[in-house]
Amino acid sequence: MSASQPPETNGAPAADVPTLLVKIFGKDRPGITAGLFDTLAAFSVDVVDIEQVVTRGRIVLCALVTEPAGVSEGELRATVHGWAESLKLQAEIISGTGDNRPRGVGRSHVTVLGNPLTSESAAAIAARITESGGNIDRIFRLAKYPVTAVEFAVSGAETEALRTALATQAAALGVDVAVMASGLGRRAQRLVVMDVDSTLIQDEVIELFAAHAGCEEQVAEVTAAAMRGELDFEQSLHARVALLAGLDASVIEKVRGEVRLTPGARTLIRTLKRLGYQVGVVSGGFTQVTDDLKERLGLDFAQANTLEIVDGKLTGRVTGEIVDRAGKARLLRRFAAEAGLPLNQTVAIGDGANDLDMLNTAGLGVAFNAKPVVREAAHTAVNVPFLDTVLYLLGITREEVEAADALDS
Ligand SMILES: [Mg+2]
């Protein structure tokens, strides 16, 4: 930069330069924003900042502008008030200096999902944010369906500390709260990897097979033993698959037809794909089902255990690499490497203890209708039964989802 150029000011007025905050509120109608700036244009003021919100037909429009050149501030005030009165709007004009106060260090997005969202919950969350040293800069609604989702933009608090403070509060209130650091990373193209059983689908695939083999109770006993910690995942997998020995392979087709997707699963995947995300599944279940899901849903990655079939019958064994708790985390890393993405741009979603390593390896781990042990260990938890609510955690609004659907239909 040559010495003759003016110092860098980023276009913002210096701190001691007089500025005016012009605030307009009242019943919204077309032309208010244009009308205000038309009125201000006569005074040759520069726009420093604009914010506008419309809630149920009421507008709040704030414009921060430089002071008028060559005419008195009083004249500007009188003209703006006159214009506002002619439209039955209220105006408030506040003198000050410089730009908005700089936001505090530490920026986070706090997403709150409520079904319903009570005013008690909103109050408690706002209070915790304040107690954590955070300032709420902006709040807006992301969705009213299938749950109410709002996002708070918060500055001045450390993201991790805010997450801890709000997690405790969320559990007590029965709402879901996700806290994520702001920044470009949040907008970067990502990879989403999901568990299958009780996450992408409502069923446990092994139980669907067991029903055909008439061994549901035995399978349930093994599952219960694993939950009590008497068997690890691999032992329980082998014990349960052994119970399927001799089952005709034609059952696979039936099981594929019985799988019920979780509500919102298609919306989640379709929207993520439109945004250029890659989407994969990892499952402690079976490739015979996950490969079909990959095909049907247009997924980029799928990995699971493989049921061995000999002479058209299940042998009661699995072949190949075992997908267990460690395996799921390993596969997340592998998919990320194949997608050319750093791990901090990945999202993992799962409900079970065997998803925990994967959830904690991902940039964002979402415990989906998970058991308390999983919920407490994950970055964030969703406890409503709609998979598309994960979109709101990523800052995507319901309106954007529906507008994209409408364009394609
Ligand atoms: Mg699961």
Image: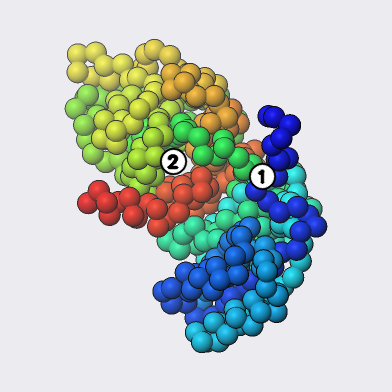
Which residue appears at 70% of the width and 79% of the height? Answer: 74
Ligand 1 has an atom within 8 Å of the beta carbon of the residue at disc 2: yes
| Vertical relation: 211 (above or below) 331 | below
Residue hosting label 1: 10
- Between circles 1 and 2, the one closer to the viewer is 1
Amino acid on which the number 2 mark rests in the picture? Thr
Q: Is residue 209 visible?
A: no
Which residue appears at 54% of the width and 24% of the height? Answer: 342
Amino acid on which the number 1 mark rests in the picture? Asn
Q: Is residue 42 visible?
A: yes
Query: Residue 242's spot in the image, x, y percent?
Result: 38, 21
Mark 2 closeness class: few <14, some 14–19, many ≥20 residues within 10 Å:
many
| Vertical relation: 60 (above or below) 189 | below
Circle 2 SS class: loop
Relative horizontal placement of residue 249, taking residue 85 as reference (left or right): left
Q: Which mark is residue 199?
A: 2
Which residue appears at 60% of the width and 31% of the height? Answer: 360
Quarter-of-image position of residue 5: top right
